[in-house]
Image (cartoon, grey):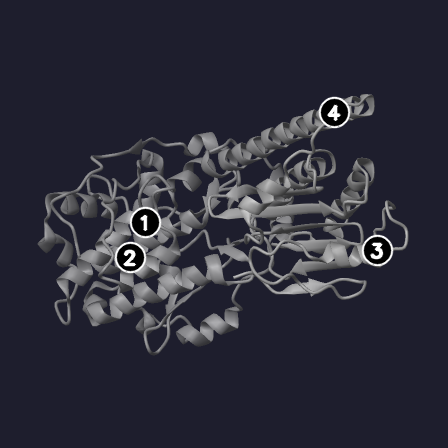
């Protein structure tokens, strides 16, 4: 439904009733004037209170539409009327109309309509609709149709040519103005296409970082400018963990792993998912955690998970979704391949870390690389491809375990750790997948596996979960990735 309309300065002008109502304001306004044929730009402004989506593209398309309508109404239509529509997006169309009183000559109509169009940014910038109602002309636009298309076509028929010399000059001038309008329209279309192409390439490609930062001081300064402090106070963490008591560690000690029954594990998986969804979508600014792992999840007395340690978090404005850095910091085994290798991070980087965490909770082991052994993602993918359900369920307690629910969580985890970030689901989709069995999940492709050099393997063997914070050039961290077959048909959870 059309949005509510606000009113600017000037006398109140009633809104035409009905979706296909043509403007009936001009005849009444014309009778109030004493001098016919003179341009009178006194009147009122109305605007739709709802904001337009994609405001920059909306503004460009609206400007193109109004330029065409002004030229048509002033120099083509015998009734000095024009109406047309232009598509902004597959589901968004702008409908526009321009009209002059018939006592104005062509130049007067053109001048009045240009003044009205020039007033649009003053009242209606970024809005879904607006009206500029002057005594001798008016313009209107909206995302909902408000005129009869057939009647509009009839009203825009050109006036018959009287065959006079003045008419010939007018025809030449009209052709020139229309040609200029068409050229401007083509230029706007090209600029819009270039803008969309540039934006899509920026969002989807793994571009090289424009410039490297120099030194720790410069990096710290940039971090302070781009994000506010998100660290928990040490006293809060001490109180929450009883001074980091060993008794409060659950799931890490093999002897206590089975204290986390499947119902509790599933509750933790869902809780972490909802927490990430809030950070990515529901908070005032988009927050990318960048270091999501098991040790950064705190559990309260009711086993409700809380995401902690925002020391590496990044804040994004509403219109940004991807960032890059040459200062890669995080934890091996949880970092997405595009971040570990290229420094590119986004919400999909957190989705990858969440997928690793989900598989760890289900299988009951960390995603560590031990020489001559299989890492967690390789193990889960091998079992998934072979349909070895029993192997996947071995690490999960049998008390209250629901195999189909466990397999669905494994399926979601594999979708989250796919190598291509575009294939990973967003957290909103993940939460729905975990809570709805009616949704058929797509088959996952092979997860990303990073082969760590030997000198790093030794360090990882000594410290299974190690945070990294290296200023070394990124070329030293570009290890090859290994992909296996990317289809699965023999194991399809419901």
Nearest to N terminus: mark 3 or mark 1: 3
Taking depth in this image into account, of 67 and 103 the one nearest to the observer is: 103
Circle 3 is placed at which residue position?
A: 42
Give the distance between the C-alpha atoms of the residues marked 2 and 4, in whole angstroms.
72 Å
Q: Earlier in the sequence, mark 4 or mark 3?
A: 3
Q: Secondary structure at mark 1?
A: helix
Residue 146 drawn above or below residue 245: above
- Which residue is outermost to the front? 162
Q: Are marks 4 and 3 in contact (CB under 8 Å)?
A: no
Q: Is residue 64 left or right of residue 406?
A: right
Which SS class for mark 3? loop
Secondary structure category for the residue under label 2? helix
Which is closer to the viewer, label 1 or label 2?
1
Along the line of sight, the residue nearer the viewer: 239 or 188: 188
Residue 481 image-quadrant placement: top left
- Disc 1 and disc 4: Cα gap in Å? 64 Å
Tell me the distance, in whole angstroms, between the alpha carbons under discs 3 and 1.
60 Å
Label drawn at residue 358: 2
Query: How many badges with numbers are in the image?
Result: 4
The alpha-carbon separation of the residues under discs 1 and 2 comes to 9 Å
- Give the number of the mark in front: 3 or 1: 3
Q: Is residue 470 left or right of residue 78?
A: left
User: Looking at the image, is mark 3 or mark 2 earlier in the sequence?
Assistant: 3
Q: Dots 1 and 2: beta carbons under 8 Å?
A: yes
Query: Does residue 84 show up?
Result: no
452 in relation to 42, above or below? above
Label 1 sits on residue: 416
Q: Residue 234: where, in percent of width, then height? A: 51, 69
Give the residue number, with chain letter if any, for mark 4.
171
Comparing 231 with 288, the one in front is 288
């Amino acid at each position: 439904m059309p949005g509510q309309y606000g009113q600017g300065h000037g006398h109140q002008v009633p809104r035409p009733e009905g979706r296909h109502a043509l403007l009936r304001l001009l005849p009444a306004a014309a009778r109030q004037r004493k001098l016919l044929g003179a341009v009178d730009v006194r009147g009122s402004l109305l605007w739709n209170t709802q904001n337009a989506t994609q405001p920059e593209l909306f503004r460009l398309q609206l400007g193109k539409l109004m330029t065409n309508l002004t030229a048509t109404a002033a120099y083509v239509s015998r009734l000095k009327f024009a109406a047309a529509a232009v598509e902004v997006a597959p589901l968004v169309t702008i409908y526009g109309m321009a009209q002059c009183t018939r006592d104005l000559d062509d130049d007067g109509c053109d001048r009045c309509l240009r003044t009205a169009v020039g007033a649009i940014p003053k009242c209606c910038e970024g809005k879904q609709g607006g009206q500029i109602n002057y005594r001798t002309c008016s313009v209107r636009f909206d995302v909902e149709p408000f005129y009869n298309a057939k009647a509009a076509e009839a009203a825009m028929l050109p006036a018959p040519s009287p065959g006079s010399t003045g008419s010939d000059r007018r025809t030449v001038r009209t052709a020139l103005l229309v040609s200029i309008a068409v050229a401007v329209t083509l230029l706007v279309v090209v600029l819009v296409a270039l803008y969309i192409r540039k934006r899509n390439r920026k969002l989807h490609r793994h571009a090289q970082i424009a410039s490297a930062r120099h030194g720790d001081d410069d990096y710290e300064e940039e971090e302070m400018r781009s994000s506010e402090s998100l660290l928990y106070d040490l006293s809060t963490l001490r109180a929450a963990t009883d001074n980091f008591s060993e008794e409060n560690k659950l799931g890490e000690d093999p002897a206590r792993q089975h204290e986390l029954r499947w119902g509790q594990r599933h509750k933790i998986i869902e809780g972490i998912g909802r927490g990430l969804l809030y950070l990515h979508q529901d908070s005032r600014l988009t927050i990318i955690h960048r270091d999501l792992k098991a040790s950064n999840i705190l559990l309260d007395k009711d086993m409700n998970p809380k995401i902690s340690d925002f020391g590496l978090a990044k804040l994004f404005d509403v219109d940004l979704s991807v960032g890059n850095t040459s200062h890669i910091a995080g934890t091996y085994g949880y970092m997405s391949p595009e971040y570990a290798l290229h420094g590119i991070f986004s919400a999909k980087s957190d989705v990858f870390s969440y997928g690793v965490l989900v598989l760890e909770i289900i299988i009951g082991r960390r995603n560590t690389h031990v020489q001559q052994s299989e890492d967690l993602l390789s193990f889960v993918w091998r079992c998934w491809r072979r349909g070895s359900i029993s192997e996947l369920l071995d690490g999960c307690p049998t008390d209250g375990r629901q195999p189909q629910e466990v397999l669905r969580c494994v399926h979601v985890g594999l979708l989250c750790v796919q190598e291509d970030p575009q294939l990973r689901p967003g957290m909103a989709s993940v939460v729905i997948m975990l809570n709805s069995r009616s949704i058929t999940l797509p088959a996952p492709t092979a997860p990303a596996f990073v082969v760590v050099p030997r000198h790093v393997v030794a360090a990882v063997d000594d410290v299974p979960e190690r945070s990294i914070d290296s200023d070394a050039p990124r070329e030293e961290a570009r290890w090859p990735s290994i992909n296996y077959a990317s289809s699965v048909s023999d194991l399809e959870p419901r």
